Amino acid sequence: MRKKTKKFIKKTGLQAFLVGLVLFFLVGGIGTIWASTLQIPDFDSFFQEQNLSQSTKIYDKTGKILLYDVAGKARRTVIPFDEMGEYVKEATISIEDSDFYNHNGIKITSIIRAFAINLASGEVTQGGSTLTQQVIKNTLLTKEKKISRKIKEAILSLKLERAMSKDDILSLYLNEAPYGGNIYGIEEVSQEFFQKPAKELTVAEAAYLASLPQAPTYLSPFGKNKDKLDARKNTTLKRMYDLGYINKEIYDQAKNEEVVFHPPEGNGIKAPHFVFYVIGQLSDDYSEEDLKTKGLRVITTLDWEIQKKAEELLVKYGEKNKRDFDANNAGFIAIDPKTGSILSMVGSVDYFDVENEGNFNVTTAKRQPGSAFKPFVYATAFMKGYTPETILFDLPTEFNTNCNPNGTPNTPGAVCYMPENYDGQYAGPITLRKSLGNSKNVTSVKLLYLTGINDVLNTAKLVGITSFTDPKRYGLSLVLGGGEVTLLELTNAYSVFANEGAYNKPKSIEKIVDSRNEVLKEYKNESKQVIDQNIARTISSVLDDDEARTPSFSINTLMNIPGYNIAAKTGTTNDYKDAWIIGYTPSITIGAWVGNNDNTPMDKKVAGQIVAPLWNEFMVDYLKNKPNEPFNPPNQTPLNIKPVLRGVWQSGDSYFVDSRTGDPADENTPKQYVEERFNSGVHSILYWVSKNTPTGPNPNRPENDPQFTLWETPVRNWAISHGFGGETTNFTPKPNPFLNTNNQNNIDSNLEIKINSIKKEAYTTNETVNISVSSDNDSQISQVDFFINNIYLSSTTKKPFTYTFIPKNISNIRNSNEVKVVVYDKNRNRFEEKSIVLVNES
């Protein structure tokens, strides 16, 4: 039965093909009679200057500012055949029509093959065109895909071959071929891209240009598919070698030649890197002909005011960075985190700077992010149950299990790995909040181990980082920026934190309308929750914490803009090839990069010195006259979890006593007298937690973890040197009866905080403002911190808990000011209260 079926299918398929072939020749015969009346027009008329008024036009988000006309006014320079250079002719023939000098205008075998494919698909999808047919198609006929047009094209090609020589036909093709945008003809594109006449092109340059007419927009050397153009260039060279136009030595030399494309001259283009990025997006959905003739109006996401400011600052700081830090380039991205809309894209200091490859869009290039990748490791750790208060020991630590704790090999050939903090300073016990705020390397590597590389890579994938494709490539250095990302992807990934865990794909186009202003396509927002809202809020809380950034960064760091909540993180690669900063508010995410396109190192300075000034000046300008947008606070760390997870480094065992008697506390002990005490015993976190289940039971045999000895040795040495070497157990560890509930508040969860003494009327700038704090149980207060507009002012540990200031002495004072007090009780439970102080600035 199966053999009969196959035989039937084969038979009917053959019959269908024969019927199609008969129809083809029947239609072709009729077409021949019809086409015999066609005349070859005067080609000279074709070379008159044209204005392609129906070409695609790209606008900013308002639809009013024209960024670029894809075709614009056609540009063409007609030259004689003998001035075109042999390489151009040979490269074009090799890739487009290797039998050009042997056929009579059409290739029957190609036409039959294309006809069969087109018949099966029901439409014209295969051309089978010779160079002669392409001349007819590009100059005399419409671009509609109909069989009647193909017949007309074939007949006219036969006539053209009888009317003109092969060299003249090739000359016609090379003088009218489209090379992208409004550029036509080999001489025009040679002068535009290489600033030389066509006859002086190298073999490699000729191969590039011969490769373009197939799809000049898609293959543009300034677009996202430059790698596809490189591959087609290599195919052209291989064909030239196979056909005997060049020898092996020339082929190898041309394949490896570094070809530099000069970017198009201004020609009215605005935001060129962004424009070519958009054209790359369009080329995925629209043909070359559609973009040139259908009169499309593309409304993009670009904010022209933001773009202008960004371009201005990249030029300003580009000169400074080149002079002071040996950095020749920079990139800038601004994104609306609520929608993923690209508000600004600047891919270099100067798009038209050929010497430094200014047309190269560094925002879409893969670079190592340094410490700018760390927040994704910390976010993954928080997902697993670690908290911002979790304690790790920041001490010199070896991580290769084939090495000793002191960093020497215990196995022949072992390469030890003992990362250093960028400032060479080690803090000892440190919370994850301060570890990320101070960008500590050692504790970040420890956290990656605790969290797991695969889980971190999964988080990266969730937030849109697509460049980490092979987990086996990465080790513990991943947290220090060992992978590669693009500035566009990294900035958009931070937008997930700004958008409280919701991901939006980067968007460059709002909508496309036709010449009648009818919407052809609208690009809707597709938001997806990929990270728990509280995790995103926690990362924003840490990255917005100026206190957490000290002492490594000063309170007045460039990441801090007085009066505004801004989360930010810098990154510098170990080899000083890349400097990054990403920062955000709930409404905008800004990413900036500084470095060199050729990967040469800059001067050995951290990103805060190289790239942060640019970012800061932009953010200050953007935020002026805009209200502050505070981040929503995350949930407080619960106290019914292990001590090491909530900030206790002296011990992982605790017990609770009645502070009045020192006896063990129980359910009958008034909560204000419940006091947590700790058995001494300083250990690394691996002593207290199993890394995959940190909130679960303590490990029975922590030494089974392969990293245990490497981590424990420096911690125990530190403990002994600081007087914490002993081990004591006063009581058998016992859970606090008041914490083992679903209530995740603190022991004194009913402590009510009040801000007093602030009047409702506005103060003058010279008037004294007195902030007084009280509670329903002042005896429990151990410390009060005072803030205004989220900037730290002062602390006090003694009653009365007050702070006094004069508005004119406060740098970030405004008409309406938010006063915040953070109160800690004796058990270091944290409480907040806020109020408003009005100031008449006049």
Image (cartoon, grey):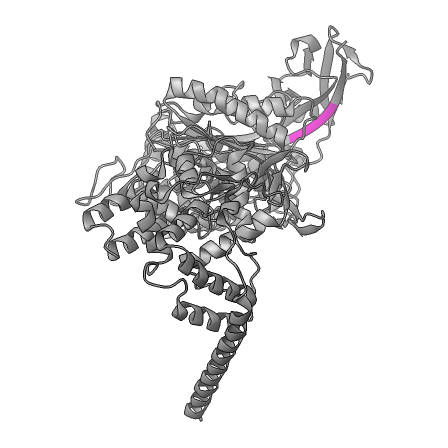
Against 672, residue 464 (above or below) is below
Q: Quadrant of the C terminus?
A: top right
Q: Give the dominant element type of the magenta stretch: helix, strand or loop.
A: strand
The percent position of residue 379, horizontal first and vertical second, equals: 52, 42
Q: Quadrant of the N terminus?
A: bottom left
Query: Picture quarter containing residue 672?
Result: top right
Of residues 559 and 659, which is closer to you in this image? 559
Of residues 672 and 176, which is closer to you in this image? 176
Of residues 170 and 7, which is closer to you in this image? 170
Magenta stretch, residue numbers:
831-835
The percent position of residue 554, horizontal first and vertical second, equals: 50, 19
Query: Picture quarter containing residue 564?
Result: top right
Query: Picture quarter containing residue 754?
Result: top right
The percent position of residue 341, horizontal first and vertical second, equals: 61, 41
Q: How many marks?
A: 0
Residue 833 lies in magenta, yes or no? Answer: yes
Against 147, residue 16 (above or below) is below
Residue 437 lies in magenta, yes or no? Answer: no
Specify whether residue 445 is in view: yes
Of residues 768 and 740, which is closer to you in this image? 768
